[in-house]
Amino acid sequence: MPRAKTQKRKRLSRDEREQQIVDEAVRYFAEVGFGGQTRELARRLGISQSLLFRYFPTKDDIVKRVYEEVYLRRWRPEWEDLLSDRSRPLADRLNQFYHEYTDAIFEFEWVRILVFSGIKGVTLYQQYLKLIHDKVLDRICTELRAEHNFPDPIKKPITVRETDLAWNFHGGIFYIAIRKFIYGAEKRENFDAAIKDSIAVFLAGAPTVFKSILKK
Amino acid sequence: MPRAKTQKRKRLSRDEREQQIVDEAVRYFAEVGFGGQTRELARRLGISQSLLFRYFPTKDDIVKRVYEEVYLRRWRPEWEDLLSDRSRPLADRLNQFYHEYTDAIFEFEWVRILVFSGIKGVTLYQQYLKLIHDKVLDRICTELRAEHNFPDPIKKPITVRETDLAWNFHGGIFYIAIRKFIYGAEKRENFDAAIKDSIAVFLAGAPTVFKSILKK
DNA sequence: TATTAAAGTGATCAAATGATCAATAAGGAA
DNA sequence: TTCCTTATTGATCATTTGATCACTTTAATA
């Protein structure tokens, strides 16, 4: 016999409820954009709309919290060591990094909220782009130089052209996520093979161009 | 002596006014997203908000019209011939194509509305992605094969891996536009140099990987 | 079991916003 | 100049939506 229909009001602790709201807000706003309404969010949570405002003073505060939740705690510090570990071939390192990175990042919520943030004019994403530049692209350029006995960045700083090439490489991979989660134009789940090929092209083609950039 | 302050009501022809509305709508929605309000749009046009609804039954109809305006009439058919013109080196062709293409496409309104369309769930962009696939990527793969005496696509169809590589290449270039117009993280105006380097990396690196894909 | 702090709700406000319509006026035709 | 079609407007409606608040209910605890 099914349980009685009495839907008893559930009373959660402050922290539990707050986390529950944030979790659902991440899902909801990723799906419909930040134009989504507090009433619908409350409906999904099975709570009254007014309760949301007991936890967050304004809707904007919910949005801010969603950003933090999605961006922070995704970057793994060990990736920095991985990329710089010269005991392994660069191709191996790049493959492992992008495998793990896309595993962490290629997610409906993450990608869409990243793109929404650009549209809303929020500035948090700039921190993210800086992170990519500092911890990924700069390292890739450095390692590429080391691999081919080009001057160390300490002697000759990484040039704009080298950084552009790294952005280009990284962007090509990220564009998979855009096709998939923003445009829904890509149904596959696994991109390891495509990423592997893309790394191979980059590692085979970049040295030539790096050489012409660094010669003289 | 300046003209009197009397702001006489201006009466335009049906067609003129309609075009004027569409033009401003493109600018306005690209700037603030499709959440923008009809009142503000009317204010920018210097007309009453109600007049908008004399030209378009609903706001959604304005939005649809904006899509059409932005997407259509940008693709130049001669690009298809350009990419396939084997009397010139492939590197030249790619450089000219991406120079002209980014010239036509790397525009605030165009890029932002493309991305918004993905968010709003509109399907028009899929036509656009198909266009890129059919008229650009497929051609690039074909030409790359010809350049290196790999089997003709008629005998051996372009593989998924080859297409992925082409997407990757194209996406890397498009990602410049995303950094610039969505994230505002790129201030430069001219990307010819970066694009040229990116083409060089691709052309230097792709043949190796194509070979391993096509061998057997 | 009685008490009570605080989690939770429903009703409601106020502003924003898409849409409507009767009234007005521009400007070409007669 | 006068007339008349229709572009244009201001006032207004109806709905949506973020936010508030007095009141209700839960469950830990004394």
Image (tube, coloured by chain):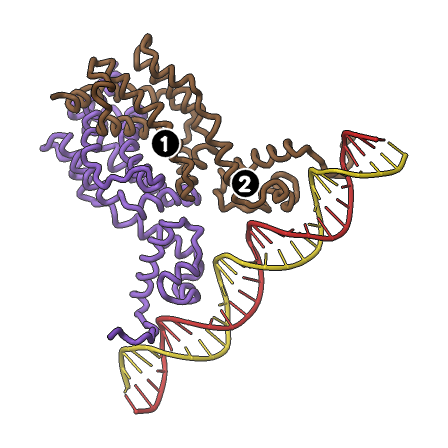
Chain colours: A purple, B brown, C red, D yellow
Mark number, residue B129: 1
Q: Quadrant of residue A91?
A: top left
State left or right for residue B166 relative to residue B69: left
State left or right for residue B198 relative to residue B28: left
* Image quarter of the C terminus of chain A: top left
Classify mark 1: residues with Cα within 10 Å, few (<14), some (14-19) or many (20+). some
Q: Quadrant of residue A153?
A: top left
> Residue B19, relative to residue D27: is it above or below?
above
Residue B76 x %, y %: 44, 21
Q: What amino acid is at disc 2? A: Ile
**Same chain letter for marks 2 and 1:** yes
> Residue A40, relative to residue B84: is it above or below?
below
Q: Residue at x 33, y 40 (%)?
A: A184
Mark number, residue B12: none
- Total numbered circles: 2
The residue that disc 2 covers is B62
* Image quarter of the N terminus of chain A: bottom left
Q: Mark 2 near mark 1, Cβ–Cβ under 8 Å?
A: no
Q: Residue at x 41, y 67 (%)?
A: A48
Classify mark 2: residues with Cα within 10 Å, few (<14), some (14-19) or many (20+). many
Residue B214 x %, y %: 16, 22
Subunit of label 1: B
Subunit of label 2: B
Residue A149 x %, y %: 16, 21
Q: What amino acid is at disc 1? A: Leu
